Image: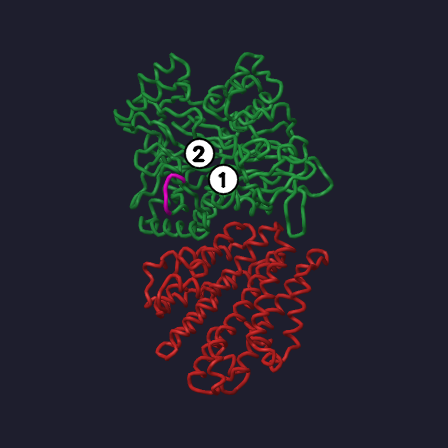
């Protein structure tokens, strides 16, 4: 009796082809050796300083995300399918954003209302009618996928603002290659190391040729931000400056950074600060994280921003429900990747259904993220559900509900043996004037607690290396 | 490079160097255990570290254990070994991309290990081990930057921080110790206690052996002063530090198309005095006066470097 699809053992308990080498390796490696390797991996991560901050806890603000040493594997066909679906989906999301900040064809077609767009908290009125480079808004998108069967993948969430986690994808691979070189000799795994170069090429493509090398920078809120490690890692891997608000200054609608040699012009900013903090003249006046005048320089076309301000319009859970329709509307294609069926509690009929079926649904805040403020019905006590129902009735439009998905499991090292734990996958999709690119793989998050379905690192999740197998040794 | 990055690299190096000097100071003070002027020795160590007033506000009396703890793990002391390392890591973390992985790992690994060393679990028995650990750490750090950094601006700002801090520390140690010895000097030099104390000055800059190799005679005050101020072969002497500072500033000027500033003029003037100075002249002017001037001018040089590159 198998409740969940296991990615190694499939539905029938037979080892699936993609996992042949992993299964053999697990069978021949004593648990004590795996434990030693796991400890070594942790030491490596700590030494390099790959940490993240957890805001709700006091004390030690720098923690490691637990790393599981058993890789998660996708074969070449599975990946080719996902890749097609991701390119299609992100292309449609960018078309939607260009439309929402442009002509609003989607409103004219009666699919969304002006009011819905204009009152959306992530809608940025300052962006209306602004010509952005190549009409692209979400240059780096993280699309969260889950799997429920051999051929069943669902999109759980689109992250269009400043998705993080790509440094874990890269560092996880680096650590695995260091710990288990013999495994990589046995299995043809598609490399992910080119991601920083792809990212840089994409960022450079956002400027028109200017006769000099365009100056690209990464803008970080600083070392106390939870993703600071990633910001510095990416800047370092791309060989560009990691700047903070104090380092940049706007003069004559152009952006400069303060260097030991005086002011130097900046052409592209990969910003890892939220819209609200970009420019105190336009957004939050108390922000010192961005630079006064940045938005004006941007609107003049003197600097490119990735991602564009206001891109968050495309990633809330109410817009999510429209994405399959957007794919048909903008691209004239059938969606390749499925959405999870979603009940919008703003709708009265849906609300009644959700209240009736709380014990089998996951209810999320329409505008929440990070796994905070959600109810996992089947795992909640009756008391918690009743309390949640009360909140839901008070403010139904703040919530959407989805069935509890039977997330696939993947063998995960649990002390002395490998046991199935639930996983999801976040691939990173790059869109620039040079096209759409995805490195084969992504960040696999794993719920380390037995039976848990919550993979968020803020809620006790860990990560795994994600292997996409090369097609018969070809260099995919 | 970013002005902020230059500033952080400079202070990263200064904090690592200061930490290293503190360990030597503590070790030198410890070596006077059982000698009559033990408390004075610790007071001079506290003064050389610039925290004697803060110490007096915190404690009523000077004991070796309290002073050693104050200098090494003291949370209230902003320049304790532990806080220097904390500051170094904050600077390092702010500019991860300007560091090589080896440098970062040296600082970060040290910081992780240092977290066990708190005020509460400090014990005198662990002190020797701790001081060894500091030396290993600072050697690892300088080894990492010497062997892995590109010879670009980043490197010259790290070197500049190292040598400016070292010059400052050497001048302070000599000044404070000399001050302690002054009253006795009028009543005749050469007692056993003097010998111990001058040796302790040398020990604080790890130069006991160096002294023997250079002078091949018993420890004499003017030789010690000459060794620490003017001798080019002594790596912690003011002269040696300033030779490095000049070189770093010249490299930076070259990288910036020949652009120079007040920092270059001032460093050049100080270096020239050190290069052509005589110890007899220094004693004639007064050692304390001379050293105070060097300490002030070194501080001024730090400000000028900051004016030119870091804002």
Instruction: Looking at the picture, tell me which residue is in the foreground, B44 or A253.
Output: B44
Given the image, what chain letter belongs to the residue carrying mark 2?
A: A
Given the image, what chain letter belongs to the residue carrying mark 1?
A: A
Q: Residue B182, can we see it?
A: yes
Say which residue appears at 39% left-offset and 45% top-offset.
A69
Figure chain in red:
B
Figure chain in green:
A
Could you tell me residue A10's position as x and y percent? 36, 31
Left or right relative to A75: residue B283: right
Residue at the spot of label 2: A425
Q: Is residue A72 above or below residue B2?
A: above
Q: Is residue A13 above or below residue B184?
A: above
Could you tell me residue B134's position as x and y percent? 43, 64
Q: Is residue A56 magenta?
A: yes
Colour scheme in the image? by chain
Q: Check if mark 2's residue and mark 1's residue have beta carbons within 8 Å.
A: no
Residue at the spot of label 1: A166
At mark 2, the secondary structure is: strand
């Amino acid at each position: 009796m198998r409740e969940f699809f296991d990615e190694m053992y499939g539905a029938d308990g037979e080892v699936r082809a993609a996992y042949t080498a992993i299964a053999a390796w697990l069978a021949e490696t004593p648990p004590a050796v795996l434990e030693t390797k796991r400890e070594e991996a942790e030491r490596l991560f700590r030494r390099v300083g790959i940490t993240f901050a957890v805001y709700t806890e006091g004390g030690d603000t720098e923690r490691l995300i637990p790393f599981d040493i058993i890789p998660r594997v996708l074969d070449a066909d599975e990946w080719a399918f996902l890749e097609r679906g991701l390119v299609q989906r992100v292309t449609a999301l960018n078309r939607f954003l260009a439309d929402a900040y442009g002509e609003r064809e989607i409103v004219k077609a009666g699919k969304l209302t002006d009011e819905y767009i204009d009152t959306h908290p992530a809608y940025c009125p300052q962006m209306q009618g602004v010509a952005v480079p190549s009409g692209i808004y979400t240059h780096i998108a993280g699309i969260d996928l889950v799997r429920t069967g051999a051929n069943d993948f669902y999109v759980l969430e689109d992250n269009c603002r400043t998705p993080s986690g790509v440094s874990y994808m890269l560092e996880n691979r680096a650590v695995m290659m260091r710990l288990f070189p013999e495994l990589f000799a046995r299995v043809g795994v598609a490399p992910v190391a080119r991601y920083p170069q792809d990212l840089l090429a994409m960022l450079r493509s956002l400027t028109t040729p200017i006769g000099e090398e365009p100056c690209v920078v990464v803008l970080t809120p600083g070392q106390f931000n939870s993703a600071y490690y990633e910001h510095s890692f990416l800047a370092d891997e791309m060989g560009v400056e990691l700047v903070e608000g104090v380092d940049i200054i706007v003069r004559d609608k152009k952006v400069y950074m303060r260097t030991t040699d005086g002011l130097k012009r900046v052409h592209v900013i990969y910003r890892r600060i939220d819209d609200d903090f970009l420019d105190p003249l336009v957004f939050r006046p108390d922000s010192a994280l961005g630079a006064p005048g940045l938005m004006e320089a941007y609107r003049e076309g003197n600097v490119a921003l990735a991602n564009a301000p206001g891109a968050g319009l495309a990633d809330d859970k109410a817009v999510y429900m429209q994405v399959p329709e957007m794919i048909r509307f903008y691209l004239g294609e059938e969606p390749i990747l499925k959405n999870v069926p979603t009940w919008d509690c703003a709708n009265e009929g849906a609300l009644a259904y959700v209240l009736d079926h709380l014990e089998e649904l996951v209810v999320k805040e329409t505008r929440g993220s990070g796994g905070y403020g959600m109810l996992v019905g089947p795992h909640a006590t009756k008391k918690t559900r009743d309390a949640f129902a009360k909140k839901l009735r008070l403010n139904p439009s703040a919530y959407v509900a989805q069935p509890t998905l039977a997330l696939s499991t993947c063998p995960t090292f649990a002390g002395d043996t490998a046991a199935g734990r639930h996983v999801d996958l976040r691939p990173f999709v790059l869109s620039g004037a040079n096209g759409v690119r995805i490195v084969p793989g992504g960040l696999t998050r794993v719920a380390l607690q037995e039976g848990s379905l919550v993979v968020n690192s803020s809620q006790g999740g860990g990560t795994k290396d994600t292997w996409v197998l090369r097609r018969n040794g070809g260099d995919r | 490079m970013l002005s902020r990055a230059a500033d952080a690299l400079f202070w990263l190096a200064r904090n690592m160097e200061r930490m290293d000097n503190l360990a030597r100071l503590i070790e030198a003070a410890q070596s006077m255990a059982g000698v009559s002027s033990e408390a004075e020795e610790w007071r001079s160590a506290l003064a050389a570290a610039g925290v004697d007033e803060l110490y007096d506000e915190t404690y009523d009396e000077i004991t070796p254990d309290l002073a050693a703890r104050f200098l090494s793990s003291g949370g209230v002391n902003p320049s304790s070994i532990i806080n220097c390392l904390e500051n170094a890591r904050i600077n390092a973390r702010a500019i991860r991309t300007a560091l090589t992985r080896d440098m970062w790992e040296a600082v970060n690994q040290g910081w992780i290990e240092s977290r066990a060393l708190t005020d509460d679990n400090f014990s005198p028995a662990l002190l020797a081990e701790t001081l060894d650990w500091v030396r290993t750490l600072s050697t690892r750090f300088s080894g990492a930057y010497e062997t892995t950094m590109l010879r670009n601006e980043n490197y010259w700002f790290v070197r500049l921080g190292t040598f400016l801090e070292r010059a400052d520390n050497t001048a302070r140690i000599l000044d404070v110790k000399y001050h302690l010895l002054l009253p006795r000097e009028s009543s005749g030099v050469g007692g056993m206690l003097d010998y111990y104390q001058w040796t302790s000055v040398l020990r604080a800059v790890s130069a006991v052996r160096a002294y023997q190799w250079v002078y091949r005679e018993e420890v004499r005050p003017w030789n010690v002063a000459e060794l620490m101020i003017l001798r080019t072969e002594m790596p912690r002497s003011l002269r040696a530090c300033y030779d490095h500072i000049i070189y770093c500033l010249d490299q930076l000027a070259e990288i910036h198309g020949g652009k120079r500033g007040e920092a270059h003029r001032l460093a050049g003037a100080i270096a020239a005095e050190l290069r052509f100075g005589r110890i007899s002249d220094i004693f004639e002017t007064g050692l304390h006066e001379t050293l105070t001037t060097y300490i002030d001018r070194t501080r001024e040089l730090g400000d000028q470097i900051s004016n030119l590159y870091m804002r």
